Amino acid sequence: MKNKIMMTMLLTAAMSASVLAGCGSGQTGAQQAEPAAAEETAAEGETTAPQQEEAAAVEEGADEGETTMIANPWSEVASAEEAAKGAGIDSFEVAEDLGLDLGENFGRTYRCMEGIAEVQLEFPASALTIRKGNPVEDGDISGDYNEYAYTWTQDIDGITVTCWGNREGDATKAIWSSGDMCFSMFAEGLGGDQDFGLNAERMEALVSNVK
């Protein structure tokens, strides 16, 4: 009798140990296979949902940060002759002494773009931009589209010069034509005079010395 009881206890203990061993692993066969499948997916290069969201945000940020740059059509050159050549026009002449009582002309910068030659002149309290270019429909190659209080014309050696300014008689902007070419002048005050312009005498001197 005692032997039967001992055998029963031994069998029960063996079965319990087997069950506990299975429970201790905490995973079924299918569950143990899941990490392997996940590792295989990662090895194949697939991304998780958070990674996909991060990539999408980067792409969206790149799209939002894109800018379109417009090329500058102007080229700076060393002389009026080079400006004319770069513009594709026959000539561009701006006298060294324009006959203007604006003080010393201490700066000259020549530029050109297709069809237009330009010089920027600097004086102690003012600056002038003078252009010569191929004909355009309205004759205005100044690039200035401001509105002014006054508009008038001035005859200079048979050339009709159209002038604009906020002070009558002082031209901040002027355009004229000679032969088949267009000319323009734009003046600005460097000492705070926003309505600076050239009076009739200065305009006559300037037009006569620009070819």
Image (cartoon, helix red, strand yellow):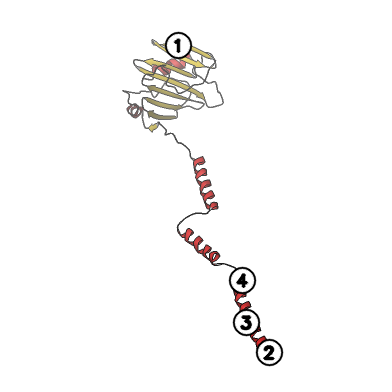
Residue at the spot of label 4: 23
Kindly identify which numbered label has been placed on residue 11: 3
Q: Which one is in front in this view, the residue at disc 4 or the one at disc 3?
A: 3
Tell me the residue at 34%/16% (across/down). 180
* Secondary structure beneath label 3: helix
Residue at the spot of label 2: 2
* Secondary structure beneath label 1: strand
Q: Earlier in the sequence, mark 4 or mark 1?
A: 4
- Dot 3: within a 10 Å radius of its alpha carbon, few (fewer than 14), some, or many (20 or more) residues? few
Q: Earlier in the sequence, mark 2 or mark 4?
A: 2
Q: Amino acid at mark 2?
A: Lys
Residue 97 coordinates in the image, percent (x, y): 40, 23
Between the residue at mark 3 and the residue at mark 2, the CA separation in whole angstroms equals 15 Å
Residue 9 coordinates in the image, percent (x, y): 66, 83
Q: Nearer the viewer, residue 35 or 18?
A: 18
Between the residue at mark 2 and the residue at mark 1, the CA separation in whole angstroms equals 138 Å
Q: Does the CB distance between marks 2 and 1 fall below 8 Å?
A: no
Decide: is 169 above or below 40.
above
Q: Earlier in the sequence, mark 3 or mark 2?
A: 2
Between the residue at mark 1 and the residue at mark 3, the CA separation in whole angstroms equals 125 Å
How many discs mark residues in the rendered view?
4
